[in-house]
C-alpha cells in the first residue's frame, strides 16, 4: 500500500509545475470522505476499515483524505491517502503539509471540512502557522446566538475543551433573495486562523472548493 500511495501521488502531480509555480501561494483544501463498505474483514483490509456514524445501512467505511489546490478556477489534486486506524486527523494534515512543501508551494488559506472541527486540529494549525478556514458546527446556545445578525462580522467563541480554546469566527451574511426558494438572511460561520480577510472573502474562498468525488474514487 505504501508503494501504491507513492505511485498514485507521482501520477497526480506529474504535471503540477505546468499549472502551479513553486514559491507561489494558492488556496488549498483537505477533504475527508467515508465510502460505505459492505464486505468482510480480513487481515489485508482490517486496519483500513473505519467505524463511524451509520450511513447507507452500514457503520463501516473506507475513508480517504484528499489534498488539492485551486487556481484560476482550476483544481489540481496533489494526493489521496487511504485512512488507517490509529492515525489521527492531525497526522494526515501533517502529511498533506509535507506534500505541499515537497512541491515547493505555499498555502494562501487551507480549507478543511467539518470533519476537522476539533481542538487538536485548530491547535496544530495555529502552532505551525498555517492560515486556515473551517466551517463551524451549529450546535449549542452560544453558537446559535453568534450566528444571528444582519451584517458580516468577526466574533470570538470559546470552544469547550480541556483546556477551553478561544476561536476567531468570521460570520458572512448572505441574503437569499428567493434563490432556491429561500428568503431572508443567512449567517455563515467559519473558524479562521492566521487570516484578516473580510468575512465575505472567507466565505467565497471556502465555497470555491471543487468537488473531489472523482479523485478519491480513481
Image (cartoon, rainbow, N blue to C red):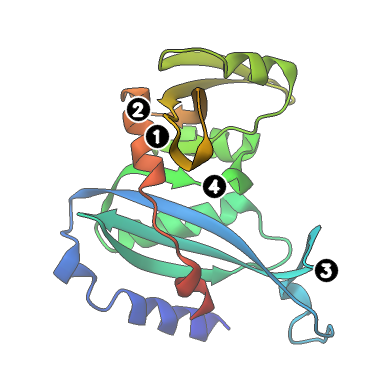
Q: Position of residue 26 (x, y in %)?
A: 26, 49
Question: Which is more N-terminal, label 3 or label 1?
Answer: 3
Per the image, the residue denoted by label 1 is 203
x 63%, y 67%: residue: 83
Instruction: Please name whichever residue, 189 or 64, is drawn nearer the observer in this view of the structure.
Output: 189
Label 1 close to label 3 by CB (< 8 Å): no
Label 3 close to label 4 by CB (< 8 Å): no
Question: Which is more N-terminal, label 4 or label 2?
Answer: 4
Q: Mark 1 or mark 4, which is nearer to you?
A: 1
Q: Is residue 46 left or right of residue 123?
A: right
Query: How far is the residue under mark 2 from the one under mark 4?
Result: 18 Å
Question: Which is more N-terminal, label 4 or label 1?
Answer: 4
For label 4, the SS is loop
Per the image, the residue denoted by label 3 is 58
In the rendered image, the vertical position of residue 41 relative to residue 100, given as above or below: below
Instruction: Please name whichever residue, 157 or 206, is drawn nearer the observer in this view of the structure.
Output: 206
In the rendered image, the vertical position of residue 113 relative to residue 178, given as above or below: below
In the rendered image, the vertical position of residue 43 relative to residue 57, given as above or below: below
x 62%, y 48%: residue: 115
Q: Is residue 19 left or right of residue 167?
A: left
Query: How far is the residue under mark 1 from the one under mark 4?
Result: 13 Å
Label 2 close to label 4 by CB (< 8 Å): no
Question: Which is more N-terminal, label 4 or label 3?
Answer: 3
In the rendered image, the vertical position of residue 62 relative to residue 73, given as above or below: below
Q: Position of residue 40 (x, y in %)?
A: 84, 85
For label 1, the SS is helix
Query: How far is the residue under mark 3 from the one under mark 4?
Result: 22 Å
Label 2 close to label 1 by CB (< 8 Å): yes
Per the image, the residue denoted by label 2 is 200
For label 2, the SS is helix
Per the image, the residue denoted by label 4 is 113
Amino acid at each position: 500500500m505504501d508503494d501504491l500511495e507513492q505511485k498514485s501521488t507521482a501520477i497526480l502531480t506529474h504535471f503540477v509545475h505546468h499549472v502551479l509555480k513553486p514559491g507561489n501561494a494558492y488556496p488549498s483544501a483537505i477533504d475527508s470522505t467515508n465510502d460505505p463498505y459492505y464486505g468482510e474483514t480480513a487481515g489485508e483490509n482490517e486496519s483500513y476499515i473505519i467505524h463511524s456514524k451509520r450511513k447507507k445501512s452500514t457503520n463501516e467505511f473506507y475513508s480517504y483524505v484528499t489534498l488539492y489546490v485551486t487556481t484560476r478556477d482550476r483544481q489540481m489534486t496533489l494526493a489521496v491517502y487511504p485512512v488507517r486506524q490509529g492515525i489521527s486527523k492531525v497526522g494526515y494534515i501533517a502529511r498533506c503539509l509535507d506534500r505541499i512543501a515537497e512541491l515547493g508551494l505555499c498555502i494562501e488559506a487551507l480549507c478543511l471540512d467539518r470533519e476537522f472541527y476539533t481542538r487538536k486540529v485548530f491547535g496544530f494549525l495555529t502552532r505551525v502557522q498555517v492560515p486556515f478556514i473551517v466551517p463551524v458546527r451549529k450546535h449549542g446556545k452560544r453558537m446559535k446566538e453568534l450566528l444571528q445578525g444582519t451584517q458580516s462580522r468577526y466574533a470570538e467563541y470559546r470552544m469547550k475543551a480541556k483546556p477551553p480554546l478561544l476561536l476567531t469566527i468570521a460570520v458572512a451574511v448572505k441574503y437569499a433573495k428567493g434563490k432556491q426558494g429561500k428568503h431572508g438572511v443567512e449567517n455563515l460561520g467559519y473558524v479562521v486562523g492566521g487570516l484578516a480577510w473580510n468575512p465575505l472573502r472567507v466565505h467565497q474562498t471556502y465555497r470555491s472548493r471543487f468537488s473531489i468525488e472523482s479523485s478519491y474514487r480513481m
